[in-house]
Image: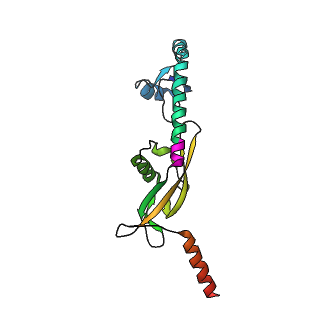
Amino acid sequence: MKVILNEDVKSLGEEGDVKNVANGYARNYLLPRNLAVPYNEATVLIFEAKKAEIEARKEIKRKNSASLKEKLEAANIEIVMPASSNGKLFGAVSANVVYETLSKLGYEVERKRIDIPGKVIKSVGNYKISIRLYEAQVAELTIAVKAQTNDGTVVEEKKEEKVEETKAEENKAE
């Protein structure tokens, strides 16, 4: 069944889009919730009249996502998790943890749009993640995962010192 969307519908399309969907999906979900109208000459004329209004709303969404992208990429995000002395986390940093951290900092993003390479982070360090925003915009941000000891203090891990220590140990062994 061909329908015209009244509102943005996740995983289907945006307001004003013409979509071909299953009859049951249209009859049982989209039409009763007024998310879509059947595609016919009358509804096409109505949406042609609203086209400029719909484009203006889409342009506002594009601008908002562009400003959100700039803010996210400029933000320093730190996540403190309990970890062992070797830097392995007792839990894992998942998209849910990142979402909650961003929410506390005042950023509104959808949990489903957060992409973490490997799905979860299991050790201390700096990681790049991406957040899919409106349309094709993607915000790339760096998250610092830090270790928390048993007494609640945050351990600042300095990888450079570790590298120097391991090189010194190797030199002693030789």
In this view, the residue farthest toward the left is 151
Q: Residue at x 58, y 74 (%)?
A: 163
Front-most of residues 102 and 5: 102
Which quadrant holds residue 151? Answer: bottom left
Query: What segment is highlighted magenta in the picture?
Result: 69-74
| Residue 40: x %, y % from top left | 54, 15
| Residue 53: x %, y % from top left | 52, 20
Q: Is residue 67 above or below residue 171?
A: above
Coloration of the structure image: rainbow
Left/right placement of residue 51 relative to residue 30 reads right
| Residue 167: x %, y % from top left | 61, 79
Q: Is residue 17 above or below residue 83?
A: above
106 falls in the magenta region: no
Q: Residue at x 39, y 69 (%)?
A: 149
Q: Residue at x 43, y 29 (%)?
A: 29
Front-most of residues 78 and 44: 78
| Residue 38: x %, y % from top left | 50, 19
In this view, the residue farthest toward the right is 174
